[in-house]
Image: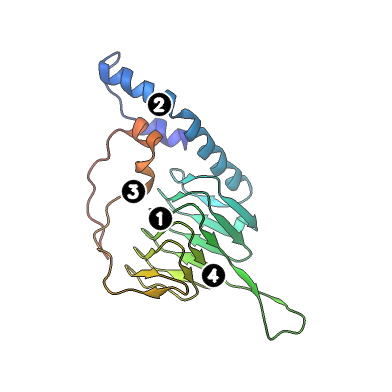
């Protein structure tokens, strides 16, 4: 992550007011950047695939990290991901604190209580809000929203909004013109890259 930020850093004129303010922000936000960099590196060393500019908070990943992939510019907060089967998280995804992603369960019909594993796929621009639970075998579509505290046991279509326990699809859909990058809302990203620039609209 640091290499990405350094390569793409904003470069105000040397010793200008902007230069001094920029470097002051970079110093002040360095601890947060360092923690997320370390979290990302730990996952990569365990075999996970994580985009170089994705930011990983105090995420607890159990199981087979090599089955976890995270695209570009995604943010994962203080979540828990149980990787007993494939977990694919796309680009520009936001996963807030307290989210639980499960890929394994047990069969109630099996006298030996045997385990069952199923993959979880989360599409680009999806937003998983605080405290949501994603159960094994679920696909969260592109641009879909899972509300706070929702328990999702069925697929959520592209750009749909799912809330409740059990989660149900609400009327209305999220806009298809998504241009944001969730990691750019982090203070250290702003300190290194400058103000968020406008990007072309991303549509289906």
Gap in angstroms between the C-alphas marked 2 and 4: 39 Å
- Report the residue marked by disc 2: 26
In the image, residue 8 sits, relative to residue 150, either above or below, namely above
Residue 115 in the image, given as x and y percentages of width and height: 69, 74
Gap in angstroms between the C-alphas marked 1 and 3: 8 Å
Q: Secondary structure at mark 1?
A: loop
Q: Residue at x 64, y 56 (%)?
A: 62
- Report the residue marked by disc 1: 93
In the image, residue 180 sits, relative to residue 90, either above or below, namely above
Mark 4 surroundings: few (<14), some (14-19) or many (≥20) residues within 10 A = many
Which sits earlier in the primary sequence, circle 2 or circle 4? 2
Residue 32 in the image, given as x and y percentages of width and height: 48, 34
In the image, residue 195 sits, relative to residue 43, either above or below, namely above
Labels 2 and 1 touching (C-beta < 8 A): no
Mark 2 surroundings: few (<14), some (14-19) or many (≥20) residues within 10 A = some
Q: Which image quadrant: the C terminus? A: bottom left
Labels 1 and 3 touching (C-beta < 8 A): no
Q: Secondary structure at mark 4?
A: loop
Which sits earlier in the primary sequence, circle 3 or circle 4? 4
Q: Is 194 on the left-hand or right-hand side of 89?
A: left
Q: Which mark is nearer the camera, 2 or 4?
A: 4
- Report the residue marked by disc 4: 135
- Report the residue marked by disc 3: 181
Q: Residue at x 39, y 40 (%)?
A: 186
Residue 102 in the image, given as x and y percentages of width and height: 58, 65
């Amino acid at each position: 992550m640091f290499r990405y930020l350094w390569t793409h850093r904003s470069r105000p004129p040397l010793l200008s007011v902007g230069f001094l303010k920029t470097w002051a922000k970079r110093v002040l936000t360095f601890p947060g950047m360092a923690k997320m960099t370390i979290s990302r590196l730990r996952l990569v060393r365990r075999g996970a695939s994580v985009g170089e500019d994705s930011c990983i908070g105090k995420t607890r990943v159990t199981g087979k990290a090599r089955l976890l992939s995270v695209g570009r510019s995604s943010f994962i907060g203080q979540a828990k991901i149980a990787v007993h089967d494939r977990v694919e998280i796309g680009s520009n995804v936001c996963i807030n604190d307290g989210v639980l992603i499960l890929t394994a369960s047990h069969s109630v019909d099996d006298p030996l209580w045997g385990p069952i594993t199923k993959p979880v796929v989360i599409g680009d621009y999806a937003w998983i809000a605080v405290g949501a639970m994603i159960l094994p075998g679920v696909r969260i579509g592109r641009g879909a929203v899972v509300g706070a505290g929702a328990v999702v046991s069925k697929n959520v279509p592209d750009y749909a909004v799912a809330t409740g326990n059990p989660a149900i699809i609400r009327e209305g859909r999220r806009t298809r013109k998504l241009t944001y990058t969730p990691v750019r809302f982090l203070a250290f990203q702003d300190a290194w890259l400058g103000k968020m620039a406008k990007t072309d609209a991303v549509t289906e």
